[in-house]
Image: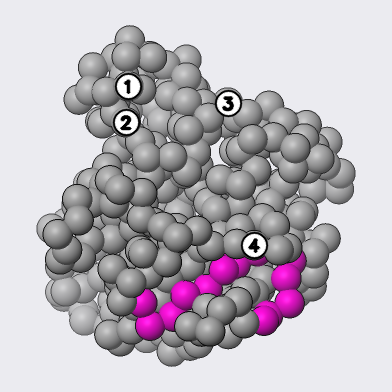
Amino acid sequence: MLNRLKKSQVLKDLSQFPAVALLGPRQVGKTTLAKQLTTEFSESLHLDLERPSDLVKLNSPEEFLKLHEGKLVIIDEIQLRPDLFPVLRVLIDEHKKAGRFLILGSAAPELLRQSSETLAGRISYCFISPFCLPEIPKSDHQTLKRLIWRGGYPDSYLAKTDQNSRRWRESYIQTFLQRDLQQMGFNLSAIGMLRLWTMCAHTHGDIFNYSKVGQSLDQSHPTIMRHIDLLEGSFAIRRLLPFEINTKKRLVKSPKVFIKDSGLLCSLLQLNSFEDLFSHPIWGRCWEGFAIEQILTALPTEVTHGFFRTHGGQEIDFVFLHKGKHIGVEFKTSSSPKLSKLNYKARDLLKLDELWIVTPNSETFPYDKEGTKVTSLPSFLNAVVLPIGEGIF
């Protein structure tokens, strides 16, 4: 059992808010984390809305939940019963007490809209991702390779063999497209969504051109935008927006799109081993997406972030702002990385306070006289990112 970074954040929020929403993709460990949290409470009740017997209990939800007023009530897969939100509001207002409800969900946008409208001021949100490096006890180079290749979904990462991991991911993709999207209320073609998701895998880390993708899939620009929204809202992809500053340079306005989990990326590209990934043209962009996901999992959600690119080619892979300090990161797979002139021009345009070059496996050392440093991803997380979220995790 691996401890999750967000455990302390959820406990802290449960001590302050009547309701806490724990959101994340299916099979990411939300239920396991919720069960771990119950040890901190004298009494708890777990309702799984995919279980018919639990659904029956909620035929009269207000009366049933009143019977368990003194317990932490965990409601799993809340997106299946959005009509419960008004009931929760009534119960919370009748008996205002922190730590009454922990709701788990797998579809972010609609849940956020419905819960924020109904439970405004009564609920906090916590997003949980697949396993990340700080959650794994032994973060050496082999661990890094395993996490990149298998991805961070617990059943995939902890599988006995790489073959078992690959089969689990293939099954997950099939179930997500054929059952989960339908269950979330999205009446979409599984084949069409697979084609789009696979297209996202092939263009992973590139500037996303909605019209070009639409032409390739024989779909309109608005349809592609709507379907990308759905994939993002169900945690299948990450849409990384540009980091904007006031400059006379023309900035790229379109987002980059990444497959959130590197293991699912490998499966969508039908790669059979880490060696296949390492020799594939996607390797550099896979490393970039993987590292960004690790960083964003550990950063507080309110930290402003994005990529920076001008139409003239000046770019920095990732930029974030914390306490007035601009920090830039370039992701390189070589152990002897080099920055281009355009990287330096982008650094000057952004007036970066720090610039880091993050590789899979490097000692930390200075790169130039301006203070740029080369380091490994685990070292960067420990030295720069985790201290920012120290009050949360």
Q: Residue 199's x, y, as percent?
A: 47, 26
Q: How crowded is mark 1: few (under 14 residues within 10 Å), some or many (20 or more)?
A: some
Kindly check if marks 2 and 3 are in contact, taking CB atoms under 8 A apart as contact.
no
Q: In which quarter of the image is residue 1?
A: bottom right
| Residue picked out by circle 2 | 209
Q: Which residue extends farthest right? A: 161
| Disc on res. 174 | 3
Q: Measured along the vertical axis of the image, is residue 265 above or below residue 118?
A: above
Give the amino acid type for the residue marked by disc 4 in the picture. Pro
Query: How far apart are the two marked residues, 4 and 2, measured between alpha carbons?
Result: 29 Å
Between 181 and 166, the one nearer to me in the picture: 166
Give the amino acid type for the residue marked by disc 1 in the picture. Lys
Query: How far apart are the two marked residues, 1 and 3, measured between alpha carbons?
Result: 26 Å
Report the span colored magenta: 352-365
Give the amino acid type for the residue marked by disc 3 in the picture. Gln
| Residue picked out by circle 1 | 212
Q: Measured along the vertical axis of the image, is residue 163 above or below residue 245?
A: above
Asked whether the viewer can see residue 274, the reply is yes
Among numbered discs 4 and 1, the one appearing first in the sequence: 1
